[in-house]
Amino acid sequence: MSLNGTAVVLNDGEALVAMGVEARQVVWQFARPLEIIRWNPDNAKNFALEMGRKAYEAQFGREPSPQRNIVTEELRKRLRARAVLVVRSLTEAGRSPKFIAEHVTDLLLSEIG
């Protein structure tokens, strides 16, 4: 296969499809005509993740950084912990659900903005 990208290889070693980025588009190149593709759950998940990486590359002109995923997960954990503390504190103080929602929304937006 001539496409410079990620190839899905069958058990017999034959490449089924290659996925890459050309002209800011995600391109699939098939090794042969296909009528149907069946994926086990792990292969489907891995292919979907790779498709997401190629879409990011097509849109931004570079591959996503693995470090960014770690940072995103750490930020998510920190924001979740802060939101729990704020909700608990404002609930105990007798604040209305609307006030709590506004306060938590503002807090989260200030952290990611």
Image: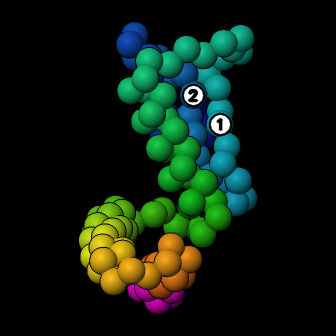
> On the rendered structure, is 80 left or right of 97?
left
Name the residue at 45% across, 33% down: 45
Identity of the residue drawn at 55% across and 44% down: 51
Against 43, is 58 above or below? below
Do the residues bearing badges 1 and 2 touch, measured as CB atoms within 8 Å? Answer: yes
Q: Which mark is residue 28?
A: 1
- Against 59, residue 95 (above or below) is below
Which residues make up the magenta segment? 106-113
As drawn, 66 above or below 48: below
Q: 89 or 28, which is in the foreground? A: 89
The three-letter amino acid code for the residue at tag 1 is Trp
The image's mark for residue 65 is none
Please tell me the numbered disc located at residue 17. 2
Residue drawn at x 54%, y 22% is: 16
**Residue 71 seen in render:** no
Confirm whether residue 97 shows in the render.
yes
> Which residue occupies 40% across, 10% down?
12
Residue 64 image point, x, y percent: 45, 63
Dot 1, how many residues are within 10 Å of its Cα: few (below 14), some (14-19), or many (20+)? some
Q: Is residue 110 magenta?
A: yes
**Left or right: where 68 falls relative to 30:** left
Can you tell which quarter of the image residue 40 is in? top left
Q: In terms of depth relative to the viewer, which is nearer, 52 or 12? A: 52
Magenta highlight on residue 43:
no
Between disc 1 and disc 2, whose residue precedes? 2
Quarter of the figure with residue 55: bottom right
